[in-house]
Amino acid sequence: MEDIVERLYEMTAFSNIVADPRFLIMYAIAFILLYLGIKKQYEPLLLVPIAFGVLLANFPGGDMGVIQADENGMVMVKGVMKNIWEMPLHEIAHELGLMNFIYYMLIKTGFLPPIIFMGVGALTDFGPMLRNLRLSIFGAAAQLGIFAVLLVAILMGFTPKEAASLGIIGGADGPTAIFTTIKLAPHLLGPIAIAAYSYMALVPVIIPLVVRIWCTKKELSINMKEQEKKYPSTTEIKNLRVLKILFPIAVTTIVALFVPSAVPLIGMLMFGNLVKEIGSNTSRLFDAASNSIMNAATIFLGISVGATMTTDAFLNWTTIGIVIGGFLAFALSISGGILFVKVVNLFTKKKINPLIGATGLSAVPMASRVANEIALKYDPKNHVLQYCMASNISGVIGSAVAAGVLISFLG
């Protein structure tokens, strides 16, 4: 009888959890992320799949955790070291399980990030940026965190490729972070993807925190519409629809000529936007890119990225360094945009609300919504959403170009 009870106990996950209490930490992380996604509604479309992936990966015996290959692509399979890139997909599915099959087929190959960028492009309206082109420069200034943390990470002992993958978290764009890390430091993909998506989801917490540090009440009360009335723009767009169709074609061509390595992201982003702007003739393509394809890609990416957060992969000093460095990159990017607005305001009569600089991230449109809510607290009539979107949308392009530059120099 005792033997039967002992076997039943060993059959459950409890024996493994008792032997390795670190599983309890991972469950706590998963539940916190689920709470933030469901109750607080912090990017639930991303955070809920990621959190559930974390949960699935840490049930002992479930074989749902992603096994990370090392720098040389080697992975342990039933006691034997194998090169993951020499294993056919059916063998990965059979030997390593369903989640590894999804991960190595869709994520590690770099397939899903450009697909998601296509969906983002289809959901993006470049109109606010085109109407306020002078504000788009703050999308470039907000990339400060990427390069600042890159230098700090190298000084801390990370290799240049690892440091670049860590720094790209400052772009606040999950697909860009994944794409860059796949190219430069694939062995760090799990913790970097988790950090990038977690901080994207925490935009409603991080932006107000950084804004409180740098901005005064007077600056946050700058009313952009009043500034427009005092100092009206001298440029007028006569045919916005034609411009919105030409814009993605022009941007793709220019980026392809100067930063070819950014084409997979920028090209797909602009293609998605182009089929949206053409109208009824490509409406079916737009509908697929923005709905079914985008939704399926988000599910697979979120749940498989979450499954990389196993106890061995996450609970170590390297991952802790990535989480801390990622937060620093994120905060510095927001600070860079704010400080650049302050510098510009010193030399111009037409003042700009620093919140526009704070939204130079790629986290669109959440960053703009958060900034608008902050502005309304200081002045209920001060709607800055459309101005923030100009900076926010340019941040999407800026982070992708920054990723292309890093891949070109270090890849």
Image (spheres, grey):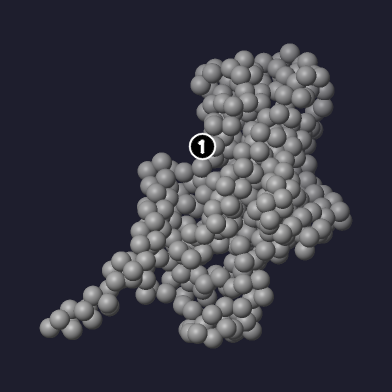
Between 371 and 386, the residue placed more toward the observer is 371
Q: Amino acid at mark 1?
A: Pro
Horizontal and vertical percent position of residue 187: 62, 66
Q: Quadrant of the N terminus?
A: bottom left
Residue at x 79% of width, y 54% of height: 405
Does residue 362 appear anywhere in the picture?
Answer: no
Question: Between 156 and 146, which is closer to the camera in this rendering?
Answer: 156
In-image side of 163 versus 346 (left or right): left
Q: Residue at x 37, y 66 (%)?
A: 20
The answer to which image quadrant residue 135 occupies is top right
- In the picture as drawn, the residue positioned furthest to the left comes out as 1
* Depicted 408 relative to depicted 202: above or below: below
Q: Residue at x 58, y 69 (%)?
A: 106
The residue tagged 1 is 204
Q: Secondary structure at mark 1?
A: helix
Camera-nearest residue between 385 and 280: 385
Crowding at dot 1, Cα within 10 Å, few <14 / some 14-19 / many 20+, comes out as: some
In the picture, residue 84 is in which quadrant?
A: bottom right
**Position in image of residue 324 (x %, y %):** 57, 47
User: Residue lying farthest right?
Assistant: 257
Q: Quadrant of the C terminus?
A: bottom right
Residue 9 position (above or below residue 112): below
Left or right placement of residue 378 versus residue 265 in this view: left
The number of numbered badges drawn on the structure is 1
Q: At which x and y percent is residue 397?
A: 72, 47
- 328 vs 127, nearest the viewer: 328
Relative image position of residue 216 (x, y in whole percent):
61, 19
Residue 287, compared with residue 342, is above or below; it is: below
| In this rendering, position of residue 245 left or right of residue 115 | right
Which residue is at a point 37% across and 43% down the rendered structure image? 39
